[in-house]
Amino acid sequence: MIFSATFMAAGIIQLPLQLFWKMEQLSIGLVLARISQITALIIIVYRAYPQMQFDGSPVSKIAFLAVIGTVLISAITQFIYVFWQAHKVLPIKIQFSRNFIRDEIRSNRQYGLAYCLSSFHTLAVLILLSNYFPTAQ
């Protein structure tokens, strides 16, 4: 879920480079993202938490969250590099319009309700499946 959320933002930021055929910059951004993620994983797994037993203790939960956090590190690295390169090609200024945001929320509120209900449906199905097919044992 974290990766999916950051992927949407990266896609929007990459648009100027894709429009102007600067695909080599996108490839460099992807390589930098993977390098930063692998570096963070090495630091977490081999330096910060060597020989970690994921047994549900508070320390193991922190280590797990740190490993998951490497996805954010990867996304931030890619975001910064791609934004820097895209800003050279097509400077983008973001201006927030409260009126536009308010009007969009008002006109699309029924879709928000549908999204919440579909998420609740997914949660309910997962709870039922976990009761009938427990995988923790």
Image (spheres, helix red, strand yellow):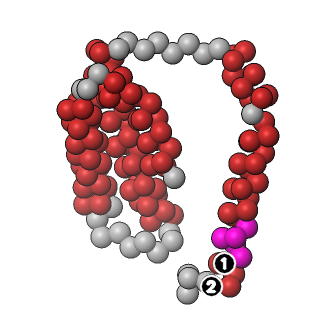
What is the quadrant of residue 46 in the picture?
Answer: bottom left
Residue 51 falls left or right of residue 131? left
SS majority, magenta: helix
Q: In the displayed structure, would residue 109 be above or below residue 59?
A: above
Nearest the viewer among 132 and 39 is 132
State the residue position of label 2. Answer: 133
Q: Secondary structure at mark 1?
A: helix
Q: In the displayed structure, would residue 21 be above or below residue 11?
A: above
Determine contact: label 1, label 2, CB under 8 Å: yes
Q: Which mark is residue 75?
A: none
Nearest the viewer among 119 and 63 is 119
**Magenta segment includes 80:** no
The residue located at (69%, 64%) in the rendering is 123
Residue 38's spot in the image, x, y percent?
25, 52
Q: Which residues are magenta?
A: 124-128
What is the quadrant of residue 29 in the picture?
Answer: top left
